[in-house]
Amino acid sequence: MIPLYAFLAGAWSAVLWFFTLGVARNLFGVFPRERAGEVTTVLFPAYFAVAIALGLLATIVLWFRRRNRRDTIALLLQALALAALISTPLLLQPAMAMHPPGTPDFARLHGISMVLNLFSLIAVPVASLLVLGRSKE
């Protein structure tokens, strides 16, 4: 199960990092803020669908293969990262849609979304290292 877990967790991390640092960062670096925001809004459903699917599969695999405390900590980190990702399209984006960009409420919700995404960007690779580092011992 380690190769399957490594693939899923690696793909999950890659999607998170590529969209955040590759796609979104470059869109905001090339286009005016409003246009970049429109494009990322269109891309979000695919981003979240792929990230959540990979995260769910990686978490299920880890659930069944956990062997020790490190695996359990990794599982907890992954579950929290998955919850953070799910909360954005489920809760935050609908709330953000009720406020025009540039307003304080939109900025607050967008900030929460960014913090949750940052948590996932860090938690997923850390969880993977906990599991895969142990498996090589």
Image: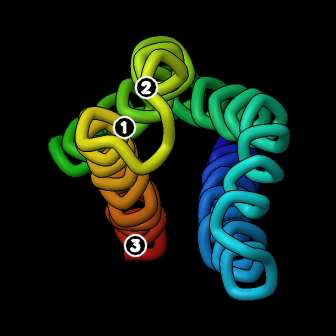
Q: Which residue is mark 3?
A: 133
Q: Amino acid at mark 3?
A: Gly
Q: Residue 109: image x %, image y %?
A: 31, 36
Q: Residue 5: image x %, image y %?
A: 64, 46
Query: What is the spatial separation of the Cα atoms under label 3 and label 1, in whole angstroms?
Result: 40 Å
In the rendered image, the quadrant that contains the N terminus is: top right
CB of mark 2 within 8 Å of CB of mark 1?
yes
Query: What is the spatial separation of the Cα atoms under label 2 and label 1, in whole angstroms?
Result: 5 Å
Regarding residue 68, the answer to whether it shows in the image is no
Q: Residue 91: image x %, image y %?
A: 42, 14
Up-down relation of residue 86 to residue 11 (above or below): above
CB of mark 3 within 8 Å of CB of mark 1?
no
Q: Amino acid at mark 2?
A: His
Q: Mark 3: which secondary structure? A: helix
Among the 4 quarters of the image, the one containing residue 81: top left
In the rendered image, the quadrant that contains the C terminus is: bottom left
Residue found at x 54% / y 21%: 97
Number of other residues with Cα within 10 Å of mark 3, as a class: few under 14, some 14 to 19, many 20 or more: few
Up-down relation of residue 86 to residue 74 (above or below): above
Q: Which residue is mark 2?
A: 99
Q: Mark 1: which secondary structure? A: helix
Could you tell whether 35 is left or right of 95 in the image?
Answer: right
Q: Which residue is mark 1?
A: 106
Among the 4 quarters of the image, the one containing residue 16: bottom right
Q: Amino acid at mark 1?
A: Phe
Could you tell whether 36 is left or right of 111 in the image?
Answer: right
Q: Mark 2: which secondary structure? A: loop
